[in-house]
Amino acid sequence: MRRLIYGMNLTLDGYVAAAGDDIGWSGPPSPELFQWWLELEQACALSLYGRKLWDTMSSFWPTGDQRAGATPAEIEFARNWRVTPKVVFSSTIDEVGWNARLVTGDAIAEIARLKAEDGGPMNIGGATLAGAAMRAGLIDEYVIATHPVLVGGGTPFFTALDSWVNLNLVETRTFPGGVLLARYERRR
């Protein structure tokens, strides 16, 4: 059975985006934090995206390694992004590219099916899609990179749950700029 990992940058008050889907609060990550995210991406065999995050990632990473001034880590991230298989969940787009397939039906049923398969870990991105997977009890690990900023509202990292989810702390690390990374595994 595959593991499902939900990880994103978020504000101290728990948002992945401020009002209006503004993610400018995070600024460019430190080279150390970017390297950490790159290594997590490289460890995953499949990426699951909601439409909004897909739009963001697919508008930049297909050619991110060709950008003037791209760092070696950014070049590697772009290359890894292109070759990693992806599943995009959306009912509002008609097609996807870049080694991705589109699922327009029941996201939870498809994620559960993918989890039941043999294979490497999967990561899930996009707060709405991850929130549905969270409510369904499908997420095995949470990775939270908390930035020292308060935005007062927007898109929360966590969704409302029907019951508690007990977690075990696996790792903490501090990055430049006061970013605190924490990894938690779901207690079984």
Image (tube, rainbow, N blue to C red):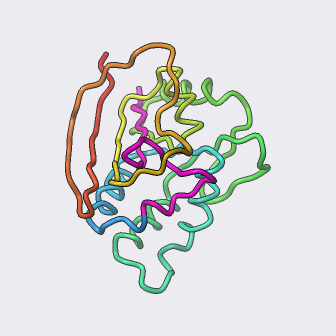
Label count reads 0
Indicate whether residue 79 is drawn in magenta. Answer: no
Query: Which residues, given as a range, are shown in magenta?
Result: 1-26
In which quarter of the view is residue 57 placed? bottom right
Q: Nearer the viewer, residue 5 or 98?
A: 5
Residue 161 x, y percent position in the rendering: 50, 20
In which quarter of the view is residue 2 placed? top left
| Residue at far front of view | 152
Q: Residue at x 34, y 62 (%)?
A: 34
- Asked whether, in this view, residue 172 is left or right of residue 117, the answer is left
Q: Residue at x 28, y 39 (%)?
A: 183
Residue 84 x, y percent position in the rendering: 49, 54
- Asked whether, in this view, residue 154 is left or right of residue 175, the answer is right
Q: Quadrant of the C terminus?
A: top left
Residue 32 x, y percent position in the rendering: 26, 64
- Asked whether, in this view, residue 80 is left or right of residue 183, the answer is right
In the rendered image, the vertical position of residue 82 relative to residue 162, given as above or below: below
In the rendered image, the vertical position of residue 66 relative to residue 133, given as above or below: below
Q: Residue at x 50, y 63 (%)?
A: 24
Q: Quadrant of the N terminus?
A: top left
- Asked whether, in this view, residue 130 is left or right of residue 71, the answer is right
Indicate whether residue 4 is drawn in magenta. Answer: yes
Residue 83 x, y percent position in the rendering: 50, 59
| Residue at far bottom of view | 68
Q: Nearer the viewer, residue 90 or 152?
A: 152
| Residue at far top of view | 163
In the rendered image, the vertical position of residue 143 relative to residue 133, given as above or below: below
